[in-house]
Image: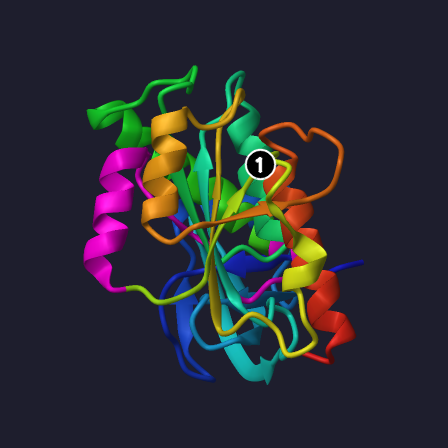
Amino acid sequence: MTMLRIFLPRRWTAGETIVLPKAESRHVQVLRLQPGDGVVLFNGEDDCEWQAQIAHIGRAEVELRVGVALPRPGRELPLAVTLALGVPANERMDALVEKATELGAAVIQPLICDRSVLRLAGDRAEARQRHWAAVAASASEQCGRVRVPTLGVPTKLAAWLRALDASGETAPRWLLSLAPTATPVAELLRPEGTGPGLIVLSGPEGGLAPDEEASALREGFVPVSLGPRTLRADTAPLALLAWLGLAGRRSGS
């Protein structure tokens, strides 16, 4: 039986006894785990898993005794990928966040574009960000990652592009595109890799509006093609992550 993996965004030391938060304690109880059973902890910061043992199960809380750290190299993509995504409709974003986490995204930035069906702002946008962050954490627990993607608050595309311009970020910028002049992704995935980071912009259903695409091109985004088929808005960025994962394995990263 695979040990339960628990993400806790904090630091600890070997031999320390910690109390799990309410939701994680409840999870342990639902699984009918017992004192002495082992679990695995990770904090998303040190690229390690920590062995731990259940020390005590109370009515509302569970205590763990932390054991040794086990480095887990190779669990992450060889480059930090930021996915900036036009939020898809019909609740597809939950599945997109889950699968993008499994495939190794480092940052997921939801975008509100001219052709977006779902409109989010203010408290609703912050609530969805918290929900998607929880989806990402759960996916990292399930798939064995030692990092959890950062989830941005849903932001209008124009505002995100302005912030990117002001940030001075120098990572390569790709725009997933159906244009016949777009560069095939295979030509960009060279054995030496693309560098330590990559920013990928992918539009919503119907793609980016012409003025949005023009703005992205002015900010240095290079149109990139994933092939001759038209992929859904929630499929294209996942296909790219799969490409990047395979390219990293072939190059020995």
Q: Position of residue 119 (x, y in %)?
A: 34, 18
Toward the viewer: 194 or 21? 194
Instruction: State the quadrant of the N terminus.
Output: bottom right
Image side of residue 31 versus residue 23, left or right: right
The structure residue drawn at horizontal position 44% and vertical position 31%, both measured from the top left corner, is 86
Q: Nearer the viewer, residue 15 or 91?
A: 91
Horizontal and vertical percent position of residue 245: 69, 62
Q: How is the image coloured?
A: rainbow
Q: Which residues are magenta?
A: 141-168
Q: Position of residue 214 (x, y in %)?
A: 36, 36
Task: Give the residue drawn at x 40%, y 18%.
Answer: 118
Query: Does residue 31 appear in this view?
Result: no
Residue depicted at x 61% and y 34%: 178
Q: Is residue 76 above or below residue 238?
A: below
Residue occupying image coordinates x 44% and y 28%: 208
Q: Quadrant of the C terminus?
A: bottom right
Q: Secondary structure at mark 1?
A: helix
- Would residue 12 be counted in the magenta stretch? no
Q: Quadrant of residue 30?
A: top right
Q: Nearer the viewer, residue 149 or 67?
A: 149
Callout 1: few (<14), some (14-19), or many (20+) C-alpha neighbours within 10 Å? many
Let me know if residue 6 appears in the view. Answer: yes
Name the amino acid, label 1.
Answer: Leu
The front one of 141 and 50 is 141
Q: Which residue is mark 1?
A: 96
